[in-house]
């Protein structure tokens, strides 16, 4: 519940709010199908930096350490009026095993589902055996390939650029992702290689956006893979495998959802550094861009400070929320009793959140997520008519009036639901309402109208006292 106080001088403001002023509700627009460009290459050649240069904004996480990007991440790009989807991938090393093998598999999958491929090579190093192996695979593919010779910051490296003809992928395009040198020429080549329509259309019109958040190694990527039925996100026992948000289209109960797997939050954003800092920013942005958030909690472990920090981010963002208790198959009777006590203490800010007990590993009850998501979103979109709201509020205030403050008892004159997404009530009063009384109103409001799974914000507008004196005609 967010409590914002202000003043109002007359009923004109109330009339404007009651007329349906709603800053949180926007019409869903169908997205047009766009051709897809996959960006591949060995680790640390500057793929993510080049992606940011193409996008014209810092979206992909970048750090001077090999292997920062691990999953395949999709972004919308625009150049000369042409829209296309660009997919950033982890470092591709054919024949790799373990975690690197999983990362390489994501790159190969991105390539197989794209309409064109951008191979990024470090011109300052030249063609390595890994580059040659990657080029060999790309030559066998039936997709257009653009060869980008990155890190060409000046003319001195043009001789090394010319040597990349040996990869057999056509003319290498010199570019500096860091400084932007020749990035426009590269984009012209990309747009020229892309078809007007994607090879395989994917229905993207109107799926509800779901952010999957939680502390590191709680099982977010495992749950996403279970829901999609494929190895969509890289999973490893090492905590923090996911760095960028990963988008996936998931069908649950006959409905299409857009799931976003996010990086696990280890530290506060302002105290994190390097990769963790940018990953935290991406996670926060994913929450802000979502409509409903699944907060994944480890049922086998006590609630941690990280869990509570994630919940705070969701509440402050005003998003609908579902709490998914993962690893429920590891919870015995003693742990369930202990967990109930922890929830009573730790989840005081979100007693309204929908709860589902699941196991991402075995698939136990994951299908119950869809009804919980729908309930939360219906509440998030729900609006109570002003007449019905004020009739209920009058009876409530008459039975339990606000506490006296400063020798005076404030009156609640009327109320309106000024917004949805999240539902926001505005109370017009003659004086300040104590926080405890606001919480009381919210509790009774939920008992009467529902709103399971959605935050409810209550704002108070205190009537401005008119100055004493004669009226000027």
Image: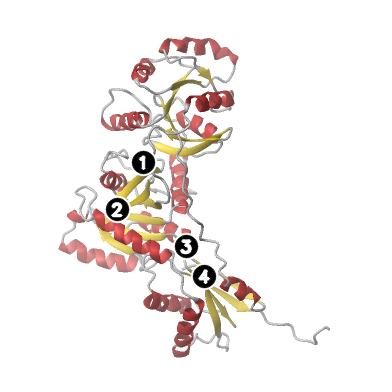
Question: The residue tagged with tag 3: helix, strand or loop?
Answer: loop
In whole angstroms, how far apart are the C-alphas of marks 3 and 4?
A: 16 Å
Q: Position of residue 459 (x, y in %)?
A: 53, 72
Extreme left residue here?
333
Residue to which mark 2 is pinned: 254
Q: Position of residue 226 (x, y in %)?
A: 25, 46
Question: The residue tagged with tag 2: helix, strand or loop?
Answer: loop
Look at the image and tell me whether residue 130 can be seen.
yes
Residue to which mark 1 is pinned: 242
Nearer the observer: mark 2 or 3; the answer is 2
In whole angstroms, how far apart are the C-alphas of marks 2 and 3?
A: 24 Å
Disc 2 or 1, which lies upstream in sequence? 1
Q: Position of residue 267 (x, y in %)?
A: 42, 49
Residue to which mark 4 is pinned: 3
Disc 3 or 1, which lies upstream in sequence? 1
Please name the residue shown 48% across and 24% down the image: 193
Please name the residue shown 56% across and 26% down the image: 183
Q: Is residue 326 left or right of residue 321?
A: left
């Amino acid at each position: 519940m967010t409590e914002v106080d202000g003043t109002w001088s007359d009923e004109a403001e109330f009339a404007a709010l009651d007329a349906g002023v709603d800053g949180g509700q926007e019409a869903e627009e169908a997205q047009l199908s766009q051709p897809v460009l996959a960006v591949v290459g060995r680790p640390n050649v500057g793929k993510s930096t080049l992606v940011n240069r193409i996008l014209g904004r810092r979206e992909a996480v970048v750090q001077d350490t090999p292997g920062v990007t691990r999953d395949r991440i999709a972004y919308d790009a625009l150049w000369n009026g042409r829209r296309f989807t660009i997919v950033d991938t982890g470092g591709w090393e054919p024949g790799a095993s373990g975690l690197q093998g999983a990362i390489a598999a994501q790159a190969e999958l991105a390539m197989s589902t794209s309409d064109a491929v951008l191979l990024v090579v470090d011109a300052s190093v030249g063609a390595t055996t890994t580059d040659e192996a990657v080029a060999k695979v790309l030559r066998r593919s039936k997709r257009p390939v653009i060869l980008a010779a990155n890190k060409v910051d000046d003319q001195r490296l043009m001789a090394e650029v010319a040597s990349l003809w040996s990869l057999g992928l056509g003319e290498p395009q010199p570019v500096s992702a860091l400084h932007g040198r020749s990035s426009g020429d590269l984009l012209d080549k990309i747009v020229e290689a892309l078809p007007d329509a994607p090879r395989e259309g994917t229905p993207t019109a109107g799926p509800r956006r779901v952010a999957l958040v939680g502390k590191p190694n709680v099982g977010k990527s495992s749950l996403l893979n279970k829901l999609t039925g494929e190895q969509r996100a890289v999973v490893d026992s090492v905590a923090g495998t996911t760095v960028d948000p990963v988008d996936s289209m998931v069908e649950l109960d006959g409905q299409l959802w857009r799931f976003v797997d996010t990086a696990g939050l280890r530290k506060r954003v302002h105290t994190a550094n390097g990769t963790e800092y940018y990953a935290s920013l991406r996670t926060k942005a994913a929450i802000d861009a979502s409509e409903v958030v699944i907060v994944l909690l480890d049922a086998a472990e006590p609630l941690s400070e990280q869990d509570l920090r994630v919940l705070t981010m969701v509440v402050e963002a005003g998003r609908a929320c579902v709490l998914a208790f993962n690893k429920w198959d590891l919870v015995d009777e003693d742990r369930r009793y202990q967990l109930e006590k922890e929830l009573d203490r730790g989840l005081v800010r979100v007693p309204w959140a929908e709860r589902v007990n699941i196991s991402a590993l075995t698939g136990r009850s994951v299908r119950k997520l869809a009804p919980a998501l729908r309930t939360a979103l219906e509440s998030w979109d729900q609006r109570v008519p002003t007449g019905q709201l004020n009739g209920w509020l009058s009876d409530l205030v008459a039975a339990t009036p606000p506490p006296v403050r400063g020798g005076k008892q404030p009156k609640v004159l009327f109320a309106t639901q000024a917004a949805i997404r999240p539902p926001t009530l505005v109370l017009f009063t003659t004086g300040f309402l104590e926080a405890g009384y606001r919480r009381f109103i919210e509790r009774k409001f939920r008992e009467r109208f529902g709103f399971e799974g959605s935050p409810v914000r209550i704002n108070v507008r205190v009537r401005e006292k008119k100055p004493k004196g004669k009226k000027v005609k």
